[in-house]
Image (spheres, grey):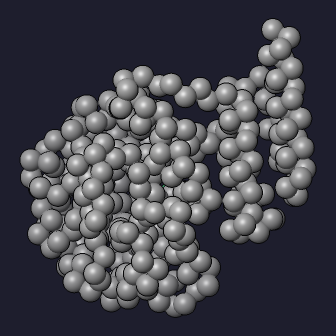
Amino acid sequence: MFKAGKIEIENAVLLAPMEDVTDISFRLICRELGADIVYTEFVNSEGLVRQSERTHKKLEIIEEERPVGIQIYGSGIESMVAAAKIAEEKQPDIIDINAGCWVKGVFGQGAGAGLLKDPVYLQRLVKEVVDNVSLPVTVKTRLGLDTNNIKILEVAKRLEDVGVQALTVHCRTRVMGHKGEADWSWIPKIKETVKIPVAVNGSIMSSEDVKRAFDESNADAVMIARGAIGNPWIFLEAKELLRDGYISTVVDEELKIKTCLRHLRLAIEVKGNRRAILEHRKFYAGYLRGLHNVSEIKKALMVPTEYDEVEDILLNYLDYLTQLKVAV
Ligand SMILES: Cc1cc2nc3c(=O)[nH]c(=O)nc-3n(C[C@H](O)[C@H](O)[C@H](O)COP(=O)(O)O)c2cc1C
C-alpha cells in the first residue's frame, strides 16, 4: 500500500517526474489514463528563491490532476527549506525531494544524486524540509553513486527516521545514468529495513514490466518514466493487467492520434502555440510507433508551427490508415 498524507493507494502506478516532459498537459493525459499520482518536473530551489518567473511557472498545478507531487531539487538547506515553503503555497498533495539526478550540472553542485555523497547531510537537509512544511515529504533517490557505493539501506533508514513518508528508488547507480538494467532486487532489502512505502523505478517500459516489478520486488508502488513518453496508455494497460490479469483496451491508430492531438492542445493552453508545437515534436515517435508508413509523416510533423497544420497532417494520416484497414 502506497501511503503519503491522505493518499492511500493499493498497487499504485505513478508517473515519474521528468524535466521538459511532465508538464500539466502530460500529467493530465496520464492521470486520465490511470496514473495514480503524477509529479511535476524537478524545480530548482535557487530559482524559486530568486523569484525566477520560468522556475515559478513549473509549480503550477490544477485540481483535475490531483493527486500531484511537486518535486524540488537543490543542495543548500536554507534554499531547499525556502523552496519547499514556496511549493507548499500551491498546495500539492506531496512535496518530493530529488536525491537522484545524475546530470553533471546538478550532481556537480551537490544536488540530486550529489546528496548521496554524504547521507548525514542529506538527512539534515530533508529533516529541515520535513520540519518546516505541513505537507507529506517524500524522496526520490538512487541505489548509490556506483556499484561500490550502494548506500540505499543507510539512506532509507536515515530518511525514515526524520519523517519522510515514502521513498522512490530508481534502481540504478549515479554512474549508470539512465543506461543498463535497473536492479529491482534491492527493493525487498529496503523494505526489510524501513516501514515507509517504497516505490520501485527504472526499466519499467511496458505494462508487463509493471506487473513483473510488483511481483519481483514487492514494492508498494511502481513509478514509470520513459515508458510513458508517447505511450501514456501504459497506465491503463497496467491497471487492467493488475486487476483482471489481461489487457482489454485496444490502443488503435485513432486513439493514438487523437490522444497525441489532445496532448498538444493542452500543451498549447499551458505554454503557448510556438513552444508547445516545437516541444511536442519529441512525442510523435512514441505516439505513432508501429503505424503503417509512418516515417514520412514523422518527417512532415517536424515542419509545422501552427496547430491546424499538425492536425491536418495527423487527421489525413488517420484517414489513410482507416482506408487501408477497409481495403484489407
Ligand atoms: C527526459 C527525462 C527527464 C527526467 N527528469 C527528472 C526529474 O526532473 N526528476 C527526477 O527525479 N527524475 C527525472 N528523470 C529520471 C526519471 O524520473 C526516472 O528515474 C528514470 O528515467 C528511470 O526510469 P525509467 O527507466 O523508467 O526511464 C528524468 C528522466 C528523463 C528520461
Task: Tell me, yes or no, if residue 196 can be seen here.
Answer: yes
Image position of 68 (left or right of 182): right
Q: Nearer the viewer, residue 98 or 254?
A: 254
Q: Nearer the viewer, residue 272 or 42?
A: 272
Find the residue positioned furthest to the top. Answer: 328
**Whether residue 104 is situated above or below residue 86 in the rendered picture:** above
Whole-percent x, y for residue 2 in the image: 26, 53
User: Residue shown at 72%/66% (left/top)?
Assistant: 269
Q: Nearer the viewer, residue 81 or 9?
A: 9
Whole-percent x, y for residue 263 in the image: 68, 52
- Count every numbered label the image shows and give the total: 0
Image position of 70 (left or right of 126): right
Image position of 217 (left or right of 264): left
Whole-percent x, y for residue 299 in the image: 83, 39
User: Residue shown at 83%/14% (left/top)?
Assistant: 326
Whole-percent x, y for residue 267 in the image: 69, 61
User: Residue shown at 11%/55% (left/top)?
Assistant: 194
User: Which of the 4 image quarters holds residue 107?
Assistant: bottom left
User: Which of the 4 image quarters holds residue 294?
Assistant: top right
Query: Where's the C terminus, which quadrant?
Result: top right
**Whether residue 195 is situated above or below residue 241 in the rendered picture:** below
Image position of 258 (left or right of 188): right
Task: Tell me, yes or no, if residue 181 can be seen here.
Answer: no
User: Residue shown at 42%/77% (left/top)?
Assistant: 91
